[in-house]
Amino acid sequence: MSRIIVSGVGNGMGCNVSSLLKSSDHEVAIISRGETGRKVAETIGAHYSRCDLMKFDDTISAVSELAKKMGGLDAVVHLAGGFFGKKETVDVVPDYFNSALNNNATTYYNVVQAALRYFPESGGSIVVISAARSVYLNSHIGYAAGKGAIDYMVRLLAHELIDRNIRVNAVSPGFIIKEKCGKGDVQDALGQVGRHDAQCVSQAVKMFVENSLVTGQILEVDAGFSSQAPSGL
């Protein structure tokens, strides 16, 4: 059993990830900015701390509080992000660009900084949610910058932390159901258009948490869209 903090939890993907990890006999603690994360924690029987992950000192305090409650920390799964939306670059004003970049990349940096203080000598796992190409190519430059920063931080951290036996990986989802704990009346199939059940993402996260020999990987979970060449080539 691992002691896991899941940060940036909402009612879709974050709820689904937290629920699967808890049902897999891991001890789970949730961090969120709003009430949704607290409700998820109550529903699945997880620890909870309310925190704005954009604030460095608050993030340090929240992670410290939860790590102490669990008697340590073995893994972190970071889901905070947002700011997806179709915009042309000329329409992305500086404040919006910076908000999109920071809400993705800075929150990840803050959580990693906080978590590294509590991993044991035996190591641990850091998993972050990025975005498949089929998603960020349908968004805007700020969103792409945020997810791109995450991907390169994953690669650097995996290299830097290997001597501490800390594995660092990313799951890059396609379009996932946002409500009802990421579950819906969909039949997942390769190449299927539309949003997919978040369970496919949760299973990838669980694999990264539990597999002791995988690090530095960015796994796209998007029904195969990002692997397809444009038609006519």
Image (cartoon, helix red, strand yellow):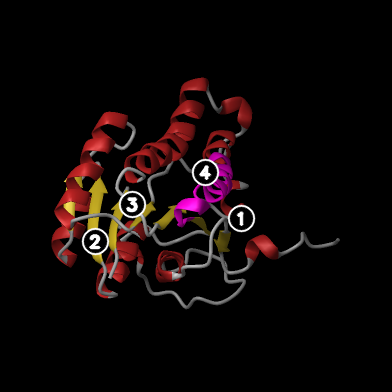
Instruction: Give the alpha-carbon distance from disc 1 to disc 3, as whole Å.
Output: 34 Å
Please tell me whether the stretch drawn in magenta is mainly helix, strand or loop: helix
Q: Quadrant of the N terminus?
A: bottom left
Q: For residue 120, which quarter of the picture?
A: bottom left
Q: Is residue 134 left or right of residue 186?
A: right
Asked whether the residues under the numbered discs 2 and 1 touch, taking CB atoms below 8 Å apart as contact, a structural biologist would say: no
Q: Which residue is mark 4?
A: 150
User: Dot 3: what SS?
Assistant: loop
SS of the residue at dot 2?
Answer: strand
| Residue 98 sits above or below residue 105 on the image | above
Cα–Cα span, label 2 and label 1: 31 Å
- In which quadrant of the rendered image does the C terminus lie? bottom right
Quarter-wise, where is residue 229 in the image? bottom right
**Tag nearer the camera, 3 or 2:** 3
Magenta residues span 147-167
Mark sitting earlier along the chain (3/2): 2
The amino acid on which the numbered mark 4 sits, given as a three-letter code, is Ile
What kind of residue is marked 1? Ser
- Closer to the chain start, of discs 4 and 1, is 1
Q: Is residue 164 magenta?
A: yes
Left-right relation of 93 to 203: right
Q: Residue at x 53, y 45 (%)?
A: 160
Q: Earlier in the sequence, mark 2 or mark 1?
A: 2
Residue at the spot of label 3: 119
Marks 4 and 3: which is nearer the front? Answer: 3
- Residue drawn at x 43%, y 34% is 106
Pointer 2 local density, CA inside 10 Å: few below 14, some 14–19, many at least 20: many
Residue tagged 1: 134
Residue at figure coordinates x 50%, y 76% from the top left: 188
Considering every residue shown, the one lying at the far right of the view is 233
Amino acid beneath label 2: Val
